[in-house]
Amino acid sequence: MKTAVVVVTVVYQCMISQYSPGVMREVVHNRQMAQAIPHSLPDVDGFVAVRDCERIGAIVWLKPEGGQWESFLAVDCAHSDEVRAWMDGHNVWSLPIAAEVDYPTAVRWRTVGDMQPGYVMVAEHVLVPMSRARPPYLME
């Protein structure tokens, strides 16, 4: 049976934290020196640390509660089981912490020092049987 990859966009309710002043700038520099992200940075609203290290270099879309969707370049990730458990929702909010934004974003959002409720938009690639994924232009 033929299969197709379908991209599904999922929006999760989450909490959003922030890095301290200057930390994300240092992380960006270190990732560029290690060639984990490009020296010529994409046009994004800011930078984030995410749970999964394989997402470094990806664009992440976040929306603070009551705000607008903004784009971020993932430049850092959780490097320990303890941090991943905290981000997975084993925290006082019982919601996953999707990302930690750079300090200038926290200033712009007026959330410095606070955990911010919000949303994260993730594109997932799903492999499905072609009979279920057949787009209208392939119908006979």
Image (spheres, rainbow, N blue to C red):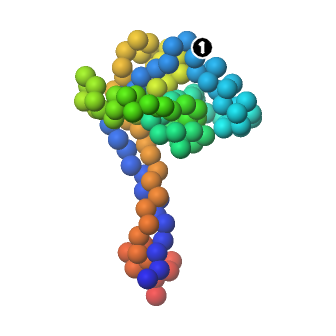
From the viewer's perspective, is residue 55 above or below residue 105? below
Where is residue 86? Give x, y as percent: 34, 28
Kindly identify the residue that appears in the image at 74 percent across and 33 percent down.
39
Viewer can see residue 42? no
In which image quadrant can residue 35 be found? top right
The residue located at (50%, 18%) in the rendering is 19
- Give the residue number, with chain letter if any, for mark 1: 22
Rendered view: 111 above or below 79? above
Q: Position of residue 4 (x, y in %)?
A: 48, 71
Q: Please tell me whether mark 1 sits on a helix, a strand or a loop.
A: loop
Up-down relation of residue 86 to residue 135 (above or below): above
Residue 128 or 56: which is nearer the viewer?
A: 56
Which residue is at the far front?
Answer: 81
Q: Could you say where residue 81 lies in the image, as x and y percent from the top left?
A: 39, 33
How many neighbours does mark 1 have within 10 angstroms: few (below 14), some (14-19), or many (20 or more)? few
The furthest residue to the bottom? 140
Q: Residue at x 44, y 66 (%)?
A: 127
Residue 6 in percent (x, y) is at: 46, 64
**Circle 1: residue type:** Gly
Residue 20 in sight from this viewpoint: yes
Quarter the N terminus occupies: bottom left
Position of residue 82 in the picture relative to residue 22 (left or right): left
